[in-house]
Image (cartoon, grey):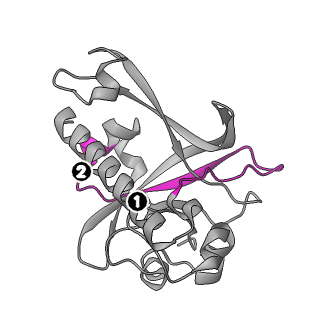
Amino acid sequence: MSSKYALLVLLVLLFHQFFSSLRNFVFGVPNQLSQIYPFPCSNQIKTCSSLLYQHNGLNKDQIATFYSVNKLQIEPISHWRGKQDYLVTVPCTCKNVNGTIGYFYDTLYTLQPGDTFPNVSRQIYIGDEVTFHLVCGCGEKDDSKPIVTYTVQEFDSLSSIVDLLSSKVGDIEKLNPYLGQRPQFLDVGWLLYVPMERS
């Protein structure tokens, strides 16, 4: 996988997050909506199979490397705008990450020559492995619908996400209670937990 491409994606996401937070502050959107919250752990389920939605234009080999998974864990899904995206099946575990308890999937990334993102390069060196704790979600029971960790894209609405992931608006609102304040207001980059109907 091209480390320069991965850094570019990270920089774009951070840049977008900064301006989204600024806009949310200026226009009065509740600040909590612009945050990423881990999915709260269930007393019954400590580990489950969860899905991460991948929409950054990476191919299966790049996704397998980035998420530390086998290519068999990557399924194509067509976005409503005709794009080829992917669902990545990962083991999701309840754990404490730096004082934050929630469901996470850990993936390792090995820094490559040319990785120059200032916050990374000052603390970590080429060849070092970095663990990324990615948020994910588990249902309350073993037979629960799989939960997709989905990042809102441009022009998304709750109804388009429902259609894409075979879900229901009410189910999405239950797993993302902050949407109740303004359920039709979604911002690019927000993270949603979406219960997906089993196929």
Alpha carbon of mark 1 to alpha carbon of mark 2: how far?
29 Å
Q: Which mark is residue 22?
A: 1
Secondary structure type for disc 1: helix
* Along the viewing direction, whichever of 53 and 4 lies nearer the viewer: 4
* Along the viewing direction, whichever of 2 and 78 lies nearer the viewer: 2
Say what amino acid the circle numbered 1 marks.
Leu
Q: Count neighbours of disc 2 (C-alpha within 10 A) and say few if under 14, some if 14 to 19, many if 20 or more.
A: some
For disc 2, the marked residue is 58
- The residues colored magenta run 35-63
Quadrant of the image occupied by residue 98: top right
Q: Is residue 62 magenta?
A: yes
On screen, residue 114 above or below 189: above
Secondary structure type for disc 2: loop
- The numbered mark, 1 or 2, whose residue comes first in the sequence reads 1
Q: Going by the image, does 19 lie left or right of 197? A: left
Q: State the image coordinates of residue 155 (x, y, percent, origin top left).
A: 33, 78
Q: State the image coordinates of residue 6 (x, y, percent, origin top left).
A: 25, 40
Task: Name the image quarter holding the N terminus.
Answer: top left
Q: Residue at x 39, y 66 (%)?
A: 23
Q: Going by the image, does 99 lie left or right of 52? A: right
Q: State the image coordinates of residue 151 (x, y, percent, origin top left).
A: 43, 61
Quadrant of the image occupied by residue 66: top left
Say what amino acid the circle numbered 2 marks.
Leu
